[in-house]
Amino acid sequence: MKFITTFSWKPDPKTREEGIARFKKTGGLPPDGVTLLGRWTSVDLSGGFDLIESDDPKAIAEFALMWSDLMELKTVPVLEDEALGAVLQRIGN
């Protein structure tokens, strides 16, 4: 299943330094059980989003735990258009 995790952080020099150091050390990669499909960060560095894939909610929680001390996170399941179209076909007109 695919998920989008949005992240945002407030300007705070200590938090920013820790976030940069952690990203440089880990590459921002998720734990085993989660595949990072893409990451986009706003050019002002205030936030962004990750597109991830996993069937393991514990691994997704572990990924969140890796960053939730530095930023606000929200993770939601998402559907691609083809899957959404199949759902919409079932409800009729």
Image (spheres, grey):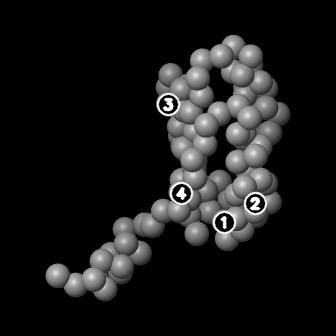
Q: Look at 60% across and 28% down and name the residue there.
A: 9
The answer, for residue 30, to whether it is visible in the render is no
Viewer-proximal residue among 11 and 81 = 11
Q: Is mark 3 in CB contact (under 8 Å) with mark 4?
A: no
Query: Which of labels 3 and 4 is toward the front?
Result: 4
**Which label belongs to residue 54?**
1
Q: Which residue is mark 4?
A: 76
Q: CA distance from mark 1 to mark 2?
A: 8 Å
Viewer-proximal residue among 30 and 59 = 59
| Above or below, 39 relative to 92 | above
Q: In the picture, residue 53 is in which quadrant?
A: bottom right
Query: Which of labels 4 and 1 is toward the front?
Result: 4
Three-letter residue code for mark 3: Ser
Q: Is mark 3 in CB contact (under 8 Å) with mark 2?
A: no
Crowd rating for badge 2 (residues with CA inside 10 Å; few <14, some 14–19, many 20+): some
Three-letter residue code for mark 4: Val
List the single residue furthest toward the top.
Answer: 13
